[in-house]
Image: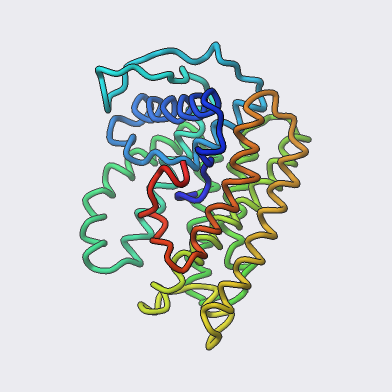
């Protein structure tokens, strides 16, 4: 989950946006409390969805938000969600996935990027170790996903479903941890699996042209070797849309007691908007997209 799961700000009411930002800021504060101030740089909107979904299933209310100072702007108070176990869980997910992403970057990136990432590994590994101690099952799920994903790339797997499976399984395990009720866990497992598949394929689609130039592993390029890029993108759009539909189908089975309109925004609008932006010929790289388009 690295930048593809966001709400669409222009479609949100003022209160909805304040609640969304409040959970985002609460997660930021929780990261600092659990893993130190450096960990705040790993904050993502993807894990904000995870936190908000978990809170929604529990019927979280506005009484848990308070006006508080922010480390980024101490003179201006913000509406921030206070401590909740779900925020701690989302913070652990954020730390573990960020550390995993950095480890992969050191192995697969160019020399310059590798040199930039190497100094970050010691603190990230320390934070990830603490997260694994706090959430052993979560740590096992992420470690297993990392090992399986490496095998996929080393074996040059050209099956799209097999290539996306490790990420999908990891997100299934992560989402399953949001509830202790077996029926709800079953639905969360399905939602997480297809959300993970969406994230993996979106990342592959986003890097399509760059991977073609560098020769890096990309399942779409292997699966459709020699085909025009536009044809590959068209297939990618279809299979990613299929995952979005499965995410929506599972989401509709959940009894979200709060934040339903915000989650609707992310599931029904946000996922498709990110896909549309990537497929635009003039669209910049995902990391370069301005926040006002996708926040």
Q: Percent from the top left, x then y, of residue 129?
A: 39, 40
Instruction: Identify whether 36 is placed above or below 107.
Output: above
Residue 121 shown left or right of residue 258 in the figure: left
Q: By what rule are the colours in the image chosen?
A: rainbow
Q: 65 or 115, which is in the foreground?
A: 65
Q: Percent from the top left, x then y, of residue 72?
A: 27, 28
Residue located 61% across and 66% down the image: 237
Residue 238 shown left or right of residue 12 in the figure: right
Residue located 66% across and 30% down the image: 260
In this view, which residue lies farthest toward the bottom? 226
Residue located 69% across and 41% down the image: 188
Residue 292, located in which quarter of the rendered image?
top left
How many marks overall? 0
Instruction: Identify whether 212 is placed above or below 12.
Output: below
Residue located 26% across and 62% down the image: 114
Q: 174 or 210, which is in the foreground?
A: 210
Instruction: Identify whether 192 is placed above or below 276.
Output: above
Q: 265 or 144, which is in the foreground?
A: 265
Residue 235 shown left or right of residue 41 in the figure: right
Instruction: Identify whether 162 is placed above or below 289.
Output: below
Q: 37 or 9, which is in the foreground?
A: 9
Q: Percent from the top left, x then y, of residue 35?
A: 35, 31
């Amino acid at each position: 989950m690295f930048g593809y799961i966001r709400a669409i700000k222009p479609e949100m009411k003022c209160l909805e946006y304040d609640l969304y930002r409040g959970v985002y800021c609460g997660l930021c504060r929780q990261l600092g409390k659990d893993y130190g101030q450096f960990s705040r740089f790993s904050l993502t909107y993807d894990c904000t969805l995870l936190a908000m979904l978990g809170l929604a299933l529990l019927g979280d209310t506005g009484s848990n938000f308070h006006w508080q100072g922010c480390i980024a702007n101490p003179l201006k108070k913000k509406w921030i969600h206070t401590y909740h176990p779900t925020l701690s869980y989302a913070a652990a997910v954020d730390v573990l996935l960020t550390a995993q992403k950095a480890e992969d970057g050191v192995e697969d990136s160019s020399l310059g990027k590798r040199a930039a990432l190497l100094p970050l590994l010691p603190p990230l590994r320390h934070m990830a170790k603490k997260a694994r101690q706090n959430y052993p099952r979560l740590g096992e799920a992420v470690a297993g996903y990392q090992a399986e994903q490496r095998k996929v790339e080393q074996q040059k797997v050209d099956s799209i479903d097999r290539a996306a499976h490790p990420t999908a399984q990891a997100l299934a395990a992560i989402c399953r941890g949001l509830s202790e009720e077996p029926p709800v866990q079953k639905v969360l497992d399905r939602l997480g699996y297809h959300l993970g598949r969406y994230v993996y394929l979106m990342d592959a689609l986003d890097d399509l042209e760059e991977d073609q130039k560098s020769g890096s592993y990309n399942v779409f390029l292997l699966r459709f070797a020699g085909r025009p890029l536009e044809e590959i993108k068209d297939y990618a759009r279809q299979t990613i849309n299929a995952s979005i539909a499965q995410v929506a189908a599972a989401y509709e089975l959940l009894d979200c007691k709060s934040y339903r309109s915000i989650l609707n925004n992310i599931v029904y609008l946000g996922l498709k908007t990110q896909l549309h932006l990537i497929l635009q010929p003039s669209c910049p790289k995902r990391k370069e997209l301005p926040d006002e388009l996708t926040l």
